[in-house]
Image: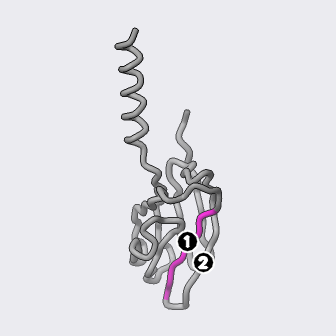
């Protein structure tokens, strides 16, 4: 019995240590222009996690939310030739990313979001 309890305890610790609190986003640039200085908050690496997307380009973007312990919404920021844009979207709770992935399509006059959840 002690062996089973010890094995369960070790498996639980390994599982918890393997989990990363990381947000995953797939970004698509459908603007026809260069998207520069793109980032999403919250991110532990704030100020060091910028990407640039050429017209029609798609990229995977990850955020490190290990410093977050509260609830809130995400905020994205990017620049184009016509200026900077901000947009609030989604939700996280206790610093945890709820979705499997969020797909973001940046269009000339709007930003579209598609939230995909894991099947439990």
Name the residue at the top extreme: 1
Q: Is residue 7 left or right of residue 95?
A: left
> Vertically, is 114 above or below 19?
below
The span from disc 2 to disc 1 (Cα, nearest Å) is: 6 Å
The image's mark for residue 76 is 1
Locate residue 51: give its quadrant: bottom left
From the image, tell me which residue sits under label 2: 86
Q: Main secondary structure of the magenta part?
A: strand
Do we see residue 45 in this rendering?
Answer: yes
Q: Is residue 87 left or right of residue 52?
A: right
> Vertically, is 81 above or below 109?
below
Q: Is residue 101 left or right of residue 59?
A: right
Q: Which residues are magenta?
A: 73-80
Q: Position of residue 27 (x, y in %)?
A: 47, 65
Callout 2–callout 1 Cβ contact below 8 Å: yes
Q: Position of residue 10 (x, y in %)?
A: 36, 27
Residue shown at the point (37%, 41%) measured from the top left: 18
Q: Position of residue 38 (x, y in %)?
A: 46, 75
Query: Dot 1: within a 10 Å radius of its alpha carbon, few (fewer than 14), some, or many (20 or more) residues?
Result: some
Looking at this view, is 25 or 13 the one in front?
A: 13
Residue shown at the point (62%, 73%) measured from the top left: 87
Looking at this view, is 55 or 15 the one in front?
A: 15
- Counting every numbered tag in the picture gives 2
The quadrant the N terminus occupies is top left
Residue shown at the point (59%, 64%) measured from the top left: 74
Locate residue 35: give its quadrant: bottom left
Looking at this view, is 40 or 20 the one in front?
A: 20
Residue at disc 1, secondary structure: strand
Q: Is residue 51 left or right of residue 81?
A: left
Residue at disc 2, secondary structure: strand
């Amino acid at each position: 019995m002690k062996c089973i309890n010890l094995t369960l305890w070790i498996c639980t610790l390994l599982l918890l240590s393997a989990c990363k609190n990381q947000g995953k986003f797939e970004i698509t640039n459908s603007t026809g222009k260069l998207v520069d200085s793109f980032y999403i908050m919250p991110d532990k690496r704030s100020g060091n996690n910028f990407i640039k997307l050429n017209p029609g380009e798609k990229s995977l973007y990850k955020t490190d939310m290990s410093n977050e312990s509260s609830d809130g919404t995400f905020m994205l920021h990017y620049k184009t030739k016509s200026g900077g844009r901000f947009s609030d979207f989604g939700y996280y709770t206790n610093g945890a990313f709820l979705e499997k992935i969020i797909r973001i399509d940046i269009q000339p006059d709007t930003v579209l979001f598609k939230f995909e959840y894991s099947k439990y």
